[in-house]
């Protein structure tokens, strides 16, 4: 059982593992865990337009762009979507 806990917080969410096992997008729960916060916090950040990497909304599904997540994990610099933060264009 101890190995399972170690696996969840370690290699499963490393950039090497994500690059090898994820497709073009991943789910919000796994992306949030890779970034170090909970699923609920991830969805809250998405709702506010502040999730640190690009997300796609496809119908009722929200997916995280794997390439963007990897860039954020490797650089530590967030890539905000920006569509929600620039509503006032005047």
Image (tube, rainbow, N blue to C red):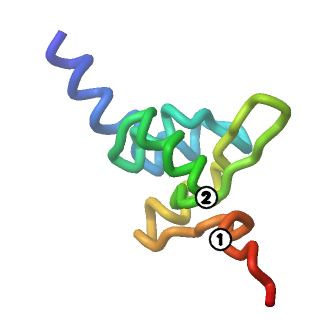
On the image, the x and y values in percent for residue 38 come to 37, 36
Name which residue lies at 50% across and 69% down: 78
Above or below, comparing residue 8 to residue 77 in the picture: above
Q: Quadrant of the rendered structure where residue 4 is?
A: top left
Of residues 54 and 23, the one nearer the viewer is 54
* Left or right of 86 in this view: 28: left
Q: Quadrant of the rendered structure where residue 83 is?
A: bottom right
Where residue 49 is drawn, which disc sits there? 2
* Left or right of 82 in this view: 80: left
Q: How many marks?
A: 2
Q: Calculate the distance from the C-alpha at mark 1 to the C-alpha at mark 2.
A: 7 Å
On the image, the x and y values in percent for residue 34 come to 41, 44
Which residue lies most toward the right here? Answer: 59
Which residue lies most toward the top here? Answer: 1
1 and 2 marks in contact (CB < 8 Å): yes
Name which residue lies at 33% across and 46% down: 36
Where residue 85 is drawn, which disc sits there? 1
On the image, the x and y values in percent for residue 18 come to 53, 42
Above or below, comparing residue 80 to residue 12 in the picture: below
Q: Quadrant of the rendered structure where residue 57 is?
A: top right
Badge 1 local density, few (<14 within 10 Å), some, or many (20+)?
few
Name which residue lies at 42% across and 42% down: 41
Q: Quadrant of the N terminus?
A: top left
Badge 2 local density, few (<14 within 10 Å), some, or many (20+)?
some
Question: Is disc 2 placed on a helix, strand or loop?
Answer: loop
On the image, the x and y values in percent for residue 24 come to 73, 44
Name which residue lies at 65% across and 70% down: 85
């Amino acid at each position: 059982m101890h190995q399972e806990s170690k696996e969840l917080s370690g290699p499963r969410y490393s950039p090497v593992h994500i690059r090898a096992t994820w497709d073009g997008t991943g789910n919000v729960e796994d992306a949030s865990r890779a970034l170090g916060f909970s699923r609920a916090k991830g969805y809250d950040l998405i709702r506010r337009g502040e999730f640190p990497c690009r997300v796609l909304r496809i119908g009722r599904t929200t997916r995280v762009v794997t390439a963007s997540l990897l860039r954020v994990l490797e650089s530590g610099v967030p890539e905000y979507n920006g569509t929600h933060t620039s509503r006032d264009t005047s």
